[in-house]
Image (cartoon, rainbow, N blue to C red):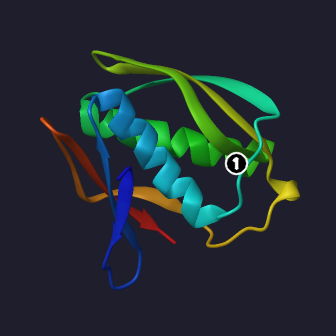
Amino acid sequence: MKYKYLEHTADIKFRSFGRTLNEAFSNAAYAMINIISEDKIKEKMTRKIKVRGIDRKSLLYSFLEEILFLLNTKNFLLSKVKEIKIKDKELTATLSGDNLRNYRLGLDVKAVTYNDMFIKEKPYVIQVVLDI
């Protein structure tokens, strides 16, 4: 299982899983994008990103917010996280996706929150609450 959604009164809460931290981060991105569109997104374009954080939580926050930023400013809807590398307080990744106008959209994710966020190791489990 890559991720699962949890009960929450007003927002969207999920947990993502991975054998590695990179995989858990990638699965968190997929859980967020699946809320925005349940369609199978084609890999027609790529974007390279680089984000920083003061710790792993802020790095996760910056990563997911960057994906939302690309969605809202460049109409880039994520299909796949490629070549993700997390080193210390920096994350680089190549993202593939398509123009969001080619897909049916579901819920509008306004922001990533720190509320109830955690990152556990061995196995890797990430929990995130999204403001919708």
* Nearer to me, 26 or 9: 26
Can residue 105 be seen in the rendering of this structure? yes
* Nearer to me, 118 or 43: 43
View extreme (right): residue = 102
View extreme (bottom): residue = 9
> Which residue carries the number 1 mark?
71
Residue drawn 40% across and 83% down?
A: 10
Can residue 109 be seen in the rendering of this structure? no
Residue drawn 41% across and 47% down?
A: 28
Q: Is residue 76 left or right of residue 99?
A: left
- Residue 63 against residue 83 in the figure, above or below: below
Q: Callout 1 environment at 10 Å: few (<14), some (14 to 19), or many (20+)? A: some
Q: Position of residue 76 (x, y in %)?
A: 75, 43
Q: Position of residue 107 (x, y in %)?
A: 61, 73
Q: Quadrant of residue 14?
A: bottom left
* Nearer to me, 40 or 45: 40
- Residue 94 against residue 33 in the figure, above or below: above
Q: Position of residue 86 (x, y in %)?
A: 36, 19
Q: Quadrant of residue 11?
A: bottom left
Q: Quadrant of residue 19?
A: top left
Q: Is residue 80 left or right of residue 73?
A: left
- Residue 121 against residue 114 in the figure, above or below: above
Q: How many marks?
A: 1
* Nearer to me, 93 or 62: 93
Three-letter amino acid code of the residue under disc 1 = Leu
